[in-house]
Amino acid sequence: MKDIKKLLFVVCISISNFVFGLQNKDVSPKSTTAEIKMSFWDLPYLKEAFINIKPTNKIDSQLAGELGIDGGKKEMIVKFAQQIANNKFGKYDSFLITHKGKLLFESYYKRGRIDLPHVQFSVTKAYTSLAIGRAIQLGYLSMNDLEKPLVNFLPRLDTTKFVAGVKKITLHQALTMSSGLRFSNEQITNFRKNPEKYKGINQIQAFLSLSKPITTTSKCYKYQGTDPILIMQVLDAIVPGSAKDFIKNELLDKLGINNYIWRNDLSGLPLADSGSSLTSRDMMKIGTLVLENGQWNGKQLISSEYLLKATSANTKPTEDWQPKTFSYGYLWYQTNLKIKNKSYDIKLAWGAGGNRIILSKELDLIIVITGHDAEDIIMTPITEIILPVFIK
């Protein structure tokens, strides 16, 4: 009976290899000339999913391996990928796994293309945080500066127009979504409809002048775009040149990331909370950088002291949609997951639609997911199905 089940499984896998494009050749879905020019939301769905258990390393410097040979249980992961293709978890566009420094698994669905930047939504916040870590590594900020009022770094502001309490907002508080800034829906609508009023430093001037007065009660966690926007303004003020050039030259270029989009905010600076688009493989590079404690190719790119703080539990998220087991660092999430009676420290960059970079130092594992799903339920099956197969 066991032999029959085994035979049936092999047959099923063989059939699925044909149907879903599971193979070792480099026939991964690439964008057409027309698709490169399209909005993400206009991209046509792939006619069939692409699932690869032995990725090529021709596109970039990522070392490649083979699922099952270099780690993981091939059958379970392929089955999971087929479930993604069959919409069991929602609308997802890519699913990649790196284990012990090797890309073992790569798959694309729907709007996923190997060479096309995918919208990141709030994963962008995590990249903004890394830019601050790079500035600290280069000496433009110090760890002690994180506890200083952020207005100290923005001398062009008119302090006479500030509402009560804003002079005491620290970089640490903004990085942990605890600035205390509060706006009405009408004010937020006004910001968006009148971009000409909020160019450059005028954006922050408006935030600090129009917010409700900051109190001890309001100075608590609230997930909002204004806090990372404050951080981007500080970055622009402290680095040579512009924040845009700094992010390009000192962060993304260093990682070999050159195929990306990072939209501008009303201010003209890079949109700090939700403006970037990266390829799935480049998201994997970000994950590798964090897993290696800020080192890249043997050089310290991000301050390791900052990165430890950024990916640790600094405060507790309070929104209904954020899992109660999650903590918040510096625009990164952290959680402890119990798997097979052992607790594992998991770091996450997380954005709407199911976009995630999931890291486990103990398992030497990075998982990248991209999607455009409104419900975003895939984290639970990942923790229950995928993470355990890398535990010996």
Image (cartoon, rainbow, N blue to C red):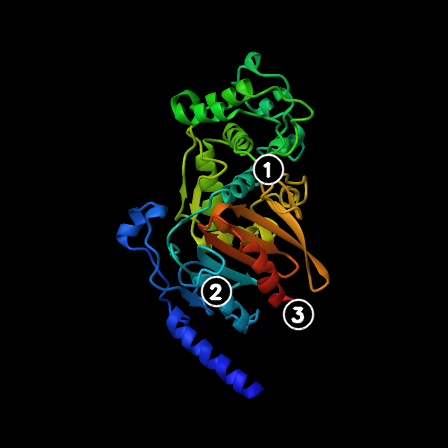
379 left or right, relative to 48? right
Q: Measure the C-alpha gap from mark 1 to mark 3.
A: 38 Å
Q: Label 1's element? A: helix
Three-letter residue code for mark 2? Gln
- Asked whether residue 21 is in view, the answer is no
Q: Identify which amino acid the numbered label 3 is placed on.
A: Lys
Residue for badge 3: 392
Tell me: 362 left or right of 239: right
Q: Amino acid at mark 1?
A: Ile
Where residue 83 is drawn, which disc sits there? 2
Give the mark nearer the N terminus: 1 vs 3: 1
**Image quarter of the N terminus:** bottom right
> Which residue is denoted by mark 1 in the rendering?
136
Q: Give the crowd class for mark 3: few <14, some 14-19, many >=20 residues within 10 Å.
A: few
Mark before the other along the chain sequence, 3 or 2: 2
Q: Nearer the viewer, residue 286 or 351?
A: 351
Q: Note whether 332 is above or below 172 in the view shown.
A: below
Q: Residue at (66%, 59%) from the top-left corner?
A: 362
Mark 1 or 3: the one toward you: 3
Residue 256 x/y as whole percent:
44, 51
Q: Residue at x 65, y 28 (%)?
A: 219
Question: Where residue 85 sits: x, y (%)?
Answer: 43, 63
